Amino acid sequence: MMNSFLPARQPFSLATVVNSHGWVQLAPFTGPDAENGFDYVLELTSGRVIAFQVGAAEGGVRVSTETALTAAERAEVEQTVTWMLGLDMDFSDFYTAVRHEPKLAQVEEQAQGRLLRAATLFENVVKSILTTNTTWGGTKRMASGLVNTFGAPLPDDPQRRAFPTPARLANADVEILRKTVRLGYRAPYVLELAQRVASGELDLEEWKTAVLPTDELRKRLLSLKGVGPYAAASLLMLMGHYDAVPVDSWAFKLVSYEWHDQQPVGRAEVEKAFADWGQWKGLAYWFWDWSYHHSLLDGSVSSEKP
């Protein structure tokens, strides 16, 4: 059994983090609703598969599981949740920088800034690859397919599975990935990434804590097959580097409505719109008050912000 309180640097809102983007809708996340946190199935480094629950608590979050854990496993879960929610992150400089901007007036009050992460950088990279050139429904389907086909099952509830580790995916048949899981052209990219990580050639998890400039991290991310400029910018934000805007067709649409009277725009116009925000440009774009954005949803195929 585990019932741990994890403090968060204030201001903090669990609901705000969970709703920061669509990751909570992708397996192996589950939960009744974002306000009540989420459940997650995790394969520990020990090989055990557990489910844990994250709920709101005064000053932080409460993490619980019905599985008996060793001290090392408990520490691993706590460290994982801290990473997933960015509990130790400080956004005071961001709040200071945006206080004069009405379109960002809500960020401090709503404790915006943190972006929900999956448990490992490997999972985040794979899921980012799954967001490109498809609908959000397609991304959800592919993520579920990977988990259901290759994820390790929860002993007490085999229908629930963890996100597959690189070792589990490394031996996958590319045609099963392509046709059964329906990853399409992404299948060889995901397979090669898993094989490189599983073999030890690539240490993705080390990138989470590496003290590197954004340009170096961007180069590393772009060196991964299947990761283009949009996915790289999104992953940089998940890694705490906000000096890039994840430019996709959704960004074109929003910037066109906001500043260009619905006329067509390109990457240059999007970049220019947020250039003055410097190290915070990615967050400024992400949390900008696009008050009309729901009316823009048309179900078109793109790598739009979920």
Image (cartoon, rainbow, N blue to C red):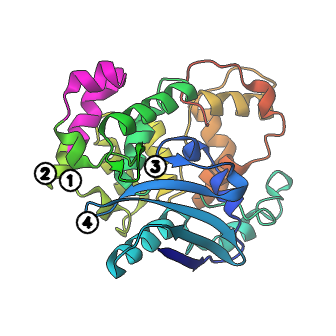
Hey, what amino acid is under mark 2?
Answer: Ser
Query: Could you say where residue 219 lies in the image, as x and y percent from the top left?
Result: 33, 48
* Tag 4 residue: 46
Q: In which quarter of the image is the C terminus?
A: top right
Neighbours of disc 1 within 10 Å: few (<14), some (14-19), many (20+)? some
Structural distance between the alpha carbons of marks 3 and 2: 23 Å
In the image, taking residue 217 as reference, residue 11 lies left or right, namely right
Q: What residue is drawn where x is 18% and y is 50%?
A: 198
Neighbours of disc 4 within 10 Å: few (<14), some (14-19), many (20+)? few
Judging from the image, what secondary structure is the residue with disc 1 in? loop
Q: What stretch is highlighted in magenta?
A: 172-194
Please say whether residue 189 is one of the residues in the magenta stretch.
yes
Q: Select label 2 or label 1 by which is in front.
A: 2
* Tag 3 residue: 235
Judging from the image, what secondary structure is the residue with disc 3 in? helix
Hey, what amino acid is under mark 1?
Answer: Leu
Q: Select label 3 or label 2 by which is in front.
A: 2
Can you tell which quarter of the image residue 18 is in?
Answer: bottom right
**Residue closer to the observer: 40 or 218:** 40
Label pair 3/1, CB-CB below 8 angstroms: no
Can you tell which quarter of the image residue 212 is in?
Answer: bottom left
Q: What residue is drawn where x is 37% and y is 41%?
A: 126
Give the label on residue 199, or none: 2
Label pair 2/1, CB-CB below 8 angstroms: yes
Mark 3 vs mark 4: which is more N-terminal? 4
Task: Report the predominant secondary structure element of the magenta stretch.
Answer: helix
Mark 3 vs mark 1: which is more N-terminal? 1
